Image (spheres, rainbow, N blue to C red):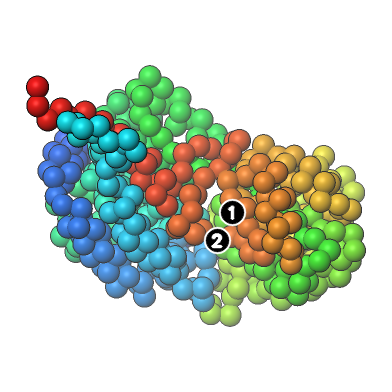
Amino acid sequence: MSDIVCISPIDGHEVARRPVASEAHIAATLKASREAQRAWAEVPLKDRCAAVLRFLDAMLAMNQEIVPELAQQMGRPVRFGGEFRGFEERVRYMVAIAEGALKPVLPADPKPGFRRMIKRTPVGIVLVIAPWNYPYLTAVNTIAPALIAGNAVILKHASQTILVGERFDQAMKKAGLPQGLFANIVLGHEQTTKLLGSGLVNHVNFTGSVAGGKAIERAAAGTFTTMGLELGGKDPAYVRGDVNLEHAIENLVDGAFYNSGQCCCGIERIYVDASVYDRFVDGFASLTRKYVLGNPMDEATTLGPMAHTRFADVVRHQTAEALAKGARALIDTKAFRANQEGTPYLAPQVLTHVDHSMSVMMEESFGPVVGIMKVTSDEEAIRLMNDSPYGLTAGIWTRDLEAAERIGDRIETGTVFMNRCDYLDPALAWTGVKDTGRGASLSPIGYEMLTRPKSYHLRHQI
């Protein structure tokens, strides 16, 4: 039996080591989950919502401990204070809409003598396979609404953030949720594959790479397990000539480099109208140079290490390839003393003279590098934004609301932003197109993913 080990990107020390679950433990977890779910589905919705809010309170109470713990696991600077503002917003919103989203659907044409309705019933056991980059936010997107809808949840968290699963488990216990309803389990790849192939879970939500999503689909093939997959992204931004330039620069620098660029909907490529291109690039590079790369436990640090050296090496390779093909690097990485080859510490980089023959403009970087291209029209920007195998979000910076919506209608993406980026609104479906995956979380549509329709055709008398 092997162990799952979390190695800190800060200095390479071991943060945590946990043994993978035994076959007997996995079987017992599934049995307990199934039994707890059947009883939980009978609990009134208002009581399920109250339990989830108690879980939220228990999690929020741990924030001071969690922030440095998270920095140790995946490198996000403590100065940014963790993830619980968005976490709380999402949980409270899904509680607020639960009654309306989960109520029966009645046909528009009543028939005398009949009661007809479609009830939304829980799918059963929901398996959440969560990533390390936003380990609380991504997990709660499914966990909270799944429980509210009457499901049981099994959480398998990423090895890089293995302690996050334990925090979820602690908060669930403090909230007094029924035993077996929520389970945090430590699994390796082979065990996860076997679990998915067993057909013993009813829905799986996975956030991760395209390759990981394909592996999930292969593992569950033939089981008819439903799934939500949020996979790769290469999110673009388009800066039009009528933009508020100062606002766009500030937004987009943060959108590109927050969390060391390790954001599902972080900005990875920018297309700028020729009329403002030079001023935008100068301002963008100038603001980027102000980042402080260093130990994330230091309050002065604004850019921590990437979660693992291999992730940083992907960005280094993409940058080197772009430079070899004629790209120009605007940031002197030597000015960042912590920047060092062979480590997770990677300085931010801004590239110009880039094109779509370069992997840095086509393949997910998931790190602190961004390419900027000059465009001369909306048509050119739309064509370039759509020239991607991915489609999670796209941002348009402009003063023209109608133009933003018109352009957004033609972009192949899950979410269109205007004058902002890198944000998830729980009132809207979080979804993607193309290789970014399928399914949706949050909003009323998120509840549809975690329930199944059950139709009732009841005749009053014969």
Q: Is residue 151 left or right of residue 133?
A: left
Whether residue 216 is situated above or below residue 392 in the rendered picture: above
Residue name at image x 75 percent, y 39 percent: 387
- Say if mark 1 contacts mark 2, CB within 8 Å: yes
Percent of width and height locating residue 378? 81, 51
Identified at 74% across, 56% down, the residue is 403
In the rendered image, residue 427, in percent from the top left (x then y), is placed at 45, 57
Q: Residues within 10 Å of mark 2 (few under 14, many from 20)?
A: some
The amino acid type, in three-letter code, at marker 2 is Tyr
Outermost residue to the bottom: 300
Q: Quadrant of residue 116?
A: top left
Badge 1: how crowded within 10 Å, few (<14), some, or many (20+)? many
Which circle marks residue 265 in the picture? 1
Q: Which mark is residue 423?
A: 2
User: Observer-nearest residue: 459 or 166?
Assistant: 459
Q: Is residue 326 above or below residue 85?
A: above
Say which quadrant the N terminus sits in.
top left
Q: Nearer the viewer, residue 377 or 29?
A: 377
What's the residue at 71%, 73% (across, down)? Answer: 247
Q: What amino acid type should be assigned to the residue bearing mark 1?
A: Cys
Instruction: Specify the quadrant of the image occupied by residue 328.
Output: bottom right
Q: How many marks?
A: 2
Q: Quadrant of the C terminus?
A: top left
* Secondary structure of the residue carrying numbered label 1: loop
19 is higher (above) or lower (below) than 284: above
- Which comes before the other along the chain, label 1 or label 2? 1
Q: Find the distance from the CA under tag 1 to the CA under tag 2.
A: 8 Å
Is the residue 285 above or below the residue 3 in the image?
Answer: below
Disc 2 is placed on an element classified as loop
* Residue 183 visible in image: no
Task: Name the residue at 27% across, 42% down.
Answer: 104
Q: Position of residue 424 (x, y in %)?
A: 51, 58
